[in-house]
Image (tube, rainbow, N blue to C red):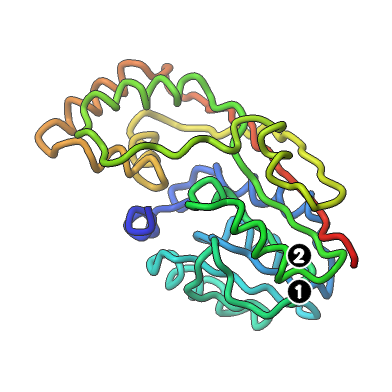
Amino acid sequence: MVDVFSRSAANYEQLGVEYFTPMGRALVERAGIRSGMRVLDVGCGRGHVLFPAAEATGPSGSVVATDLAEGMVSLTAAAAAHLPWVTVGLGDAGAPDHPDGAFDAVLAGLVIFFLPSPEDALSAYRRVLRPGGRLAFSTFGAQDPALQTVVKTLAPFARPSEGERPADRFRDPASIASLLAGWSGVEITEHPVETRFSGRPLFWDWLWSHGIRALLEQIPADRLDEARAAAYAVLPEAPFSLHTVLRVTTAVRPSP
């Protein structure tokens, strides 16, 4: 997945379609990021969380943003070069390499469900937070039926993937809350997001710009045109919108 996101980096949230951007704003708002705070943004991608967080902390604060995808890091670092209180670098969202208690907030936008051990990641976030510091991470709730139908339509064209998919530890609020034993003030909220598309070609390009690219890359090149036609056939007439539910989970590291 790291390589998939590196290959997606140039177009990730760069096609004139707002999908991740409103999700990042919602996460930062729910996290309560304020002026002067020290923030860690793990799995920063192209900055859908980073930039609203940097705006909220202002120059009196700091934002450290990390990602394992080199393509994401290089492009996001260039975009953030005018913000001296922002640092962007390579880093593992599952194992942040920072001192204990270094941050007032840890933000993880749509990344935790990719990690091989969410429990270990949550323990690491707790370690790098100061007592009373705040964790906020986002996951997907309900996906638009049209997107689900497209994915199901494309799946038979793809080569079988290697290995088994990990169990979905974030399928519902109860499953999410069960991972946060030992944290205080756990809250899970849902935020509707509408993403508008002017036409089917834009939608197809958008599919290549994020994690669904992993499925598309499993389709043999000589079947891509056929797969695209099948996807177009199940999409609504243009223009159309996708409606996604974002879940934002917040929690507080208890004081000793």
Residue closest to the eye, 106 or 237: 106
Disc 1 target residue: 38
Q: Residue at x 50, y 71 (%)?
A: 91
Image: 216 above or below 119: above
Say whether residue 133 is left or right of residue 20.
right
Residue 53 position, x and y percent, is: 71, 63
Q: Residue furthest right?
A: 256
Label placed on residue 105: 2
Vertical side of 85 occupied by 174: above or below: above
Q: Is residue 182 above or below residue 222?
A: below
Query: Nearer the N terminus, badge 1 or badge 2?
Result: 1
Question: Tag 1: residue type?
Answer: Arg
Callout 1–callout 2 Cβ contact below 8 Å: yes
Q: Residue at x 36, y 60 (%)?
A: 6
Q: Residue furthest bottom?
A: 84
User: x%, y% of residue 45?
Assistant: 50, 59
Of residues 46 and 195, the one nearer the viewer is 46
**Front residue (pair 203, 149):** 149
Would residue 128 be found to the left or right of residue 171 on screen?
A: right
**CA distance separating discs 1 and 2:** 7 Å
The x, y position of residue 59, in whole percent, is: 76, 79
